[in-house]
Image: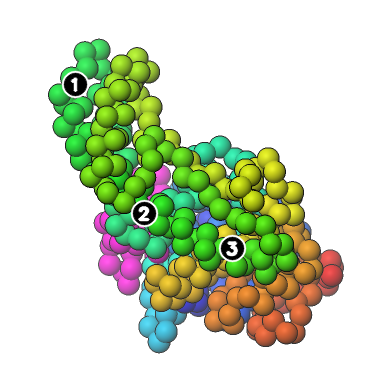
Amino acid sequence: MILKKMRIRQFRNYEDQTLMFDQGIQYITGRNAQGKTNLLEAILYLSTTRSHRVNDDAELIKESRDFFLINGTLEKGNRSIELRIHVSKEGKNLFIYKSPIRKVSDFVGTCNAVMFCPDDLTLFQAAPRVRRRFIDMELSKMSKTYMNALTKANRLLKERNAALKLESINQEYVKVIDDQFLDLQVLIMKQRKKFLDELMSCGKNFYEDISQDLSDLAYTYVSAVPYEEDENAVKQSLRKKYEKNWTRDCMMKQTMIGFHKDDVIFTINGKEMSVYASQGQKRSALLALKLGIVFMNKEVTGEYPILLLDDVFSELDEYRRKKLLEVLPSEVQIFITATDRYSIPEECGKKITDWYVEHGTVKKGAENYGSK
Ligand SMILES: Nc1ncnc2c1ncn2[C@@H]1O[C@H](COP(=O)(O)OP(=O)(O)OP(=O)(O)O)[C@@H](O)[C@H]1O
């Protein structure tokens, strides 16, 4: 899949820009604060209908404007798909071929993009919610079942918490919520475990290749109850845990355990990555996980996603940059942003198109400064 054409209107520091992209590498350079990340953010928004930087869509609307618009034309095999997102203070409207799409899950993943940005480098030591968000976002693009279960579970969590905040708590009502709530949690746990298993087996090979280090990468899923094959048994253990936690939930006026508190601890040679691994090992591990996601997407959807490498080229040494581009097949469309134009070895066999960004305007071609 490639993004063939994109128009962004009143998005961040862009007024109205239409761009025609090609296959291969789109190398976008420019000085700081010109709009390089904003451009990739717009592509990711077309994929996930969310920004990776802010929760409030209003921040994405250009200053003193009252809406933004992103149009994208995708090329999937010999099919062309048109997507449109219109966001104003009144809300968000999604369209595929001019038809309005009511359910976000019917839109997400049509444009499949995977982003790797400097903030990702803190994944291993960040708060658990950052790792949950990473899993939820990647998994939602690949599985509508997961995304729907997550949406419903979040709605039930809100209802349960609202019930716990009442002056007199109706335990029977909460039990009714819990019945469906626990089923969804078991499904979420199961899918997260499957995703992480596949990601690890894929990522391990890339790690070895990128870092030439034979350390063993693994993960532990941390949850209120251990996951096992028998889903009924997991539901029963969760129910018991919820019963045990009832007084605490009432006291705290919120649900203290569950899918929304789970975590994943990444390890290297059996030790916690966040405290044991060197910066270089963390970088390689993260790169390996991102590549794992690219190849898993191909497995699940039949197509490679668009890869967005925002400002991470400067974080990788020459060897890792070369490896990264070698591992990716030529049909993967890759957007790279950087202040410097690093040279790309010919052996990578990819077509390179240069772009230059200045004050929210993108032009074809590279400026001469900063070439490495
Ligand atoms: N809603 C908005 N309206 C207008 N301008 C905005 C808005 N949001 C962000 N900007 C502007 O966008 C610019 C930042 O763009 P961006 O984050 O894409 O920079 P960048 O080119 O990636 O820079 P760097 O190399 O420093 O990462 C800033 O000048 C900021 O003021």
Q: What amino acid is at disc 1? A: Gln
Q: Position of residue 132 (x, y in %)?
A: 47, 45
State the residue at coordinates (42%, 38%). Answer: 223
Marks 2 and 3: which is nearer the front? Answer: 3
Q: Is residue 205 visible?
A: yes
Look at the numbered disc 1 and give the secondary structure of its residue.
helix
Which disc is residue 191 wearing?
2
Q: Secondary structure at mark 3?
A: helix
Q: Residue at x 31, y 29 (%)?
A: 241
Q: CA distance from mark 1 to mark 2?
A: 30 Å
Amino acid beneath label 2: Gln
> Disc 3 or disc 1, which is closer to the eye?
3
Task: Of the two numbered discs 1 and 2 on the same chain, state the one appearing first in sequence.
Answer: 1
**Magenta span of residues:** 84-109
Pointer 2 local density, CA inside 10 Å: few below 14, some 14–19, many at least 20: some
- Rendered-image quadrant of the C terminus: bottom right
Residue 239's spot in the image, x, y percent?
Answer: 25, 32
